[in-house]
């Protein structure tokens, strides 16, 4: 077979860097398609997003490394892939790059024979990372690529020739995948991870045959949606494991095979990637925190995450064109989140050196217990930027628009992290709303947005209404103790002592910009909520609240009495009654009761 393209007899760092970027660009353009055909191991529609996120992490590292040495480039690619890997296919992809880097660690440039050995090593690492490799998946295509390189490099020095033939062999292997895995045959699709790997090979081939790196850089943020016959994926309510759980374990004292043995009983879809210095763990489980706690015995656990696969499958079944996001400080129950199809980016909680993910590795009961027993006062922090990037990349491949509603930007960096992520992905399609409050302020706005989405209100009108709602609420927070607000630095210690002596407590709310403010002081007694109702009547001046939210921390009796009294005055309002989450209870302590109301103006 003859080729009119220029032969390439060696690959150095510069060429490998450009080829990897070209591979990433091709896959990223096909993210939507890969999500749509994702049915294995769980039909949660995120394979494209996970592989794209992994490659985005690689691209970020390659922006700052233009070395001519291939060992430098592959080392950076391996490290960034391992840190940024998401999902089954993303973690396998990271292990693939880890194998290449391991074999080329002493090389500045390589021939086809030398590169063939690296590809062989990468397949071995990817295959051995799995506890139960499945034929018909990405691992089958990686094997075919390795076999093709091994055979073709024996008597050919041209990278272009081998890449071309190896790609064709991998495309054939991809077409065979439905015959090797029943679930693919049932849905009449190829494996999404395998398709993604072939897309990457296509990107490399297109680049070496005349692509321009400038065009690739320019197109990296674009997403394309190739045509695919619609098929319905159904979440199995009897599915064994719900959470796609991942983390990095640094400086491990056991090896990957030992990790597999210890983790095997926690779930399935287990992948152990990387080496002892930095090990990537991926597993589907019902108990993410048990996994993290066990792993902490063998190294330092970092980059924890646990995606709810049930929620992701629900996204695949949606009929709306607008996705909704909140942070976990919204204090909406899991039931309400499911009813209104609202996605959550969790805040982080720290008790000294112990790090937790709100609602994922620490539920509200566990948090309240630790708040009273831990020697460390908890600190809450906004979700890291990568959590927003991953959430938005996933949702933007399923919806035309995303509306993301968050705790006041005057209180937290959450809003800014969300805004920055939106700018990186699709600023014109992801709309960030400052709730100008905390707790159920954002939650109630999100519910009202969900109702508008269901009623097919145009996106511009929904955004306008959401911003208007952020100026139409009032909050009252009633404390039972000042101990926690003093510990959290929200109240001067000396002022707190005086108030405690006099048996007064501050009445706290938010100003028009979403900053905490003191709304006077009230007596510390069981029925002090009566003072709040009296204030409400005066503020409303004949108007009626549309929505009222009541939250509490170990004060259900008092909060219930408050709710009944409110209903006696404003019985036609819509009421919400929840336990307050870590963002508020960490500063308020037991006995706290909060009330939020909205009124049309």
Image (cartoon, rainbow, N blue to C red):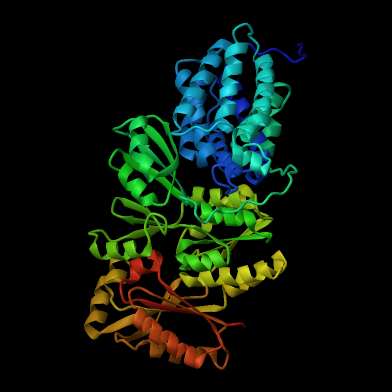
**Residue that appears at 37% across and 35% down:** 260
**Residue that appears at 64% across and 52% down:** 396
The one nearer the camera, 86 or 268, is 268
Q: Position of residue 25 (x, y in %)?
A: 65, 35
Q: Is residue 241 left or right of residue 49?
A: left
Q: Position of residue 420 (x, y in %)?
A: 56, 52
Q: Is residue 50 above or below residue 255?
A: below
**Residue that appears at 39% across and 90% down:** 530
**For the C terminus, which image quadrant?**
bottom right
Q: Is residue 325 above or below residue 2?
A: below
**For the N terminus, which image quadrant?**
top right
Q: Is residue 538 visible?
A: no
Q: Is residue 196 visible?
A: yes
Q: Is residue 400 left or right of residue 338?
A: right
Report the number of discs.
0
Q: Is residue 353 above or below residue 453?
A: above
The one nearer the camera, 379 or 141, is 141
Q: Looking at the image, which residue sits at the far top?
A: 155
Q: Position of residue 119 (x, y in %)?
A: 54, 20
Q: Position of residue 168 (x, y in %)?
A: 69, 22
């Amino acid at each position: 077979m003859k080729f009119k393209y220029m032969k390439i007899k060696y690959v150095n760092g510069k060429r490998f860097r450009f080829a990897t970027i070209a591979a990433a660009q091709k896959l990223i353009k096909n993210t939507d398609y890969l999500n749509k055909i994702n049915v294995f191991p769980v039909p949660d529609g995120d394979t494209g997003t996970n592989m794209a996120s992994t490659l985005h992490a690689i691209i970020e590292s390659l922006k700052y490394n233009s070395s001519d040495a291939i060992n430098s480039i592959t080392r950076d690619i391996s490290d960034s892939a391992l840190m940024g890997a998401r999902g089954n296919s993303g973690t396998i992809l990271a292990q693939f790059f880890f194998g290449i880097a391991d074999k080329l660690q002493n090389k500045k440039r390589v021939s086809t024979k030398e590169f063939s050995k690296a590809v062989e090593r990468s397949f071995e690492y990817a295959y051995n990372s799995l506890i139960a490799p499945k034929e018909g998946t990405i691992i089958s295509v990686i094997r075919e690529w390795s076999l093709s390189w091994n055979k073709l490099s024996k008597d050919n020095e041209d990278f272009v020739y081998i890449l071309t033939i190896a790609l064709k062999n991998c495309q054939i292997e991809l077409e065979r995948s439905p015959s090797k895995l029943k679930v693919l045959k049932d849905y009449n699709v190829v494996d999404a991870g395998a398709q993604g790997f072939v897309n990457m090979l296509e990107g490399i081939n297109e680049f070496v045959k005349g692509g321009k790196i400038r065009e690739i850089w320019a197109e990296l943020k674009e997403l394309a949606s190739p045509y695919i016959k619609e098929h319905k994926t159904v979440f199995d309510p009897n599915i064994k494991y719900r959470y796609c759980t991942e983390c990095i374990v640094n400086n491990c004292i056991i090896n990957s095979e030992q990790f597999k043995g210890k983790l095997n009983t926690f779930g399935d879809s287990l992948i152990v990637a990387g080496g002892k210095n930095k090990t990537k763990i991926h597993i589907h489980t019902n108990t993410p925190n048990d996994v993290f706690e066990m792993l902490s015995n063998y190294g330092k656990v970092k980059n924890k995450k646990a995606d709810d696969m049930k929620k992701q499958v629900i996204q695949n079944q949606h009929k709306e064109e607008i996705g909704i996001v909140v942070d976990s400080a919204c204090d909406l129950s899991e039931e309400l989140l499911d009813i209104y199809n609202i996605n959550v980016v969790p805040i982080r909680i720290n008790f000294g050196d112990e790090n937790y993910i709100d609602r994922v590795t620490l539920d509200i009961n566990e948090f309240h217990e630790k708040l009273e027993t831990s020697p460390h006062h908890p600190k809450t922090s906004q979700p890291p930027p990568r959590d927003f990037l991953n959430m938005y990349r996933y949702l933007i491949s399923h919806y035309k628009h995303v509306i993301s509603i968050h705790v006041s930007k005057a209180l937290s960096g959450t809003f800014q992290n969300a805004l920055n992520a939106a700018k990186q992905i699709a600023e014109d399609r992801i709309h960030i709303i400052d709730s100008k409050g905390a707790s159920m302020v954002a939650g109630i706005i999100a519910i009202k947005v969900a109702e508008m989405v269901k009623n097919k209100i145009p996106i511009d009108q929904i955004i306008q209404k959401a911003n208007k709602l952020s100026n139409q609420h009032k909050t009252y927070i009633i404390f039972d103790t000042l101990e926690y607000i003093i510990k959290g630095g929200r109240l001067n210690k000396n002022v707190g002592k005086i108030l405690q002596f006099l048996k007064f407590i501050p009445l706290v709310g938010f100003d028009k910009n979403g900053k905490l403010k003191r709304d006077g002081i009230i007596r510390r007694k069981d029925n002090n909520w009566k003072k709040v109702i009296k204030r409400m009547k005066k503020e409303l001046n004949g108007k009626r609240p549309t929505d009222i939210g009541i939250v509490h921390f170990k004060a259900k009796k008092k909060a219930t009495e408050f709710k009944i009294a409110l209903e006696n005055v404003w019985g036609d309002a819509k009421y919400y009654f929840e336990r307050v989450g870590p963002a508020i209870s960490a500063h308020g302590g037991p006995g706290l009761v909060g009330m939020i109301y909205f009124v049309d103006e």
